[in-house]
Image (spheres, grey):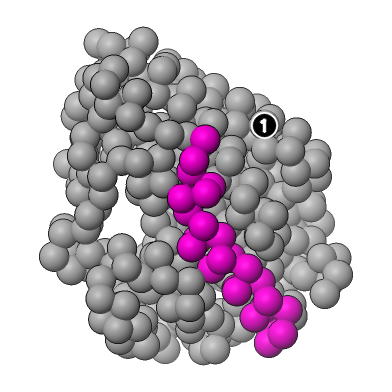
Amino acid sequence: MDPSDKPFLRALSGEAVWPPPIWLMRQAGRYLPEYRATKEKAGGFLELCLNPELSAEVTFQPLRRFPMDAAILFTDLPMLPWAMGQGLRYGQGGDDGVGPILEPVRDAAGLAALRPQDAARRAAPIMETVSRIRAGLERDHTGTALIGFAGAPWTVACYMIDGRGGHGFPVARGMAEDDPAFLESLFEILVEAAEHYLVAQAEAGAEALMLFDSWAGLLPPDGFERWVLDPTIVLTARLRARLGPDFPLIGFPRLAGPGIPAYAARAGVNAVGLDETVDLTGPLPEGVTLQGNLDSRTLVAGGEALQEATAHILDAMRGRPFVFNLGHGITPDTPIEHVAALVERVHRG
């Protein structure tokens, strides 16, 4: 299908598509019983990420229920360090429980063991997943675009240095203050790895790429500039040099607050994802497509609260390039019927 016929890609190109396209972060995931069954069949979360047939299956599962305008590759942020050779496992329950556990990289020996040039090759099963999804979309969901993704350098570094999530990443934050030379060296490796990894996704069939900087909000303003914005500028420039100046890129600097205008102006992305803390009635960046920002808890609540919040976002974004999404990912306790109601309401405009 011609990309110009896909509402999501039209919105990323700067067109004020109305009704706006919609997709939801973590739309393929644990709120769906068929996802839980597929993960059990795979034998675990890491095994699911590395099984192209089953990863493609869980990517398609929400599309069979809801007319989403984009599908996003099913994988996880720590798969990039895994692809460079860092040890990775998932605690009991995988994405439902402890989450990723990595062998921390905190010294020169740890850096020397990383192989950024091998990231795309070692992640070959993920690239096969991309190809399978794209083929299935072209066959069965012709208006739906495919998003590939990776963690942005700062967020991936947080996992790599601290070795796990959920605790505020004190070691990574400390290194930003006390050992910036180490962090700079790690970021050079991460930018190179992310370039190879994301270009391979695009070559396999991804039609847009998203950079998740989920922990951008942990940094003070000067740290945000140095560790979030500057490496993103370098990475997006490399991606555009490889993929062309018009390839759609989305950045999501979660909880960045006052850093969002500078990010929108300088990060080199077509679209900026906004988390639920951003007031859409206040000053917003111009010149980029915006994506967001319904509170995930409102989706859980449903009913009148969901209808009012959705209408508020639609009213605020009418007339500008926009993609409807959540401010963060779907939570496991989300009722399926609430997702259906949201998609139906957004598509009414």
Q: Is residue 283 visible?
A: no
Question: Which residue is label 1 attached to?
Answer: 238
Give the vertical position of 221 relative to 126 (above or below): above
* Residue drawn 39% across the image and 56% down it: 76
Amino acid type, residue under disc 1 in the picture: Arg
The picture places residue 252, in percent across and down from the top left corner, at 51, 45
* Residue drawn 68% across the image and 62% down it: 205
> What span is in magenta?
117-141
Give the vertical position of 63 relative to 126 (above or below): below
The picture places residue 313, in percent across and down from the top left corner, at 57, 62
Horizontal relation, residue 141 to residue 77: left or right: right
Give the vertical position of 32 relative to 261 (above or below): below
The picture places residue 207, in percent across and down from the top left corner, at 70, 59
Report how many numbered discs are placed on residues in the image: 1
The picture places residue 157, in percent across and down from the top left corner, at 35, 33
Residue 134 falls within the magenta-colored stretch: yes
Q: Quadrant of the N terminus?
A: bottom right
* Residue drawn 73% across the image and 79% down it: 138
Horizontal relation, residue 68 to residue 228: left or right: right
Q: Nearer the viewer, residue 306 or 175?
A: 175
Residue 344 falls within the magenta-colored stretch: no
Main SS, magenta residues:
helix
* Residue drawn 52% across the image and 35% down it: 117
Q: Nearer the viewer, residue 35 or 318?
A: 35
Corner quadrant of residue 261: top right
Q: Nearer the viewer, residue 313 or 13?
A: 13
Q: Is residue 83 visible?
A: yes
Q: Nearer the viewer, residue 12 or 48?
A: 48
Corner quadrant of residue 330: bottom left
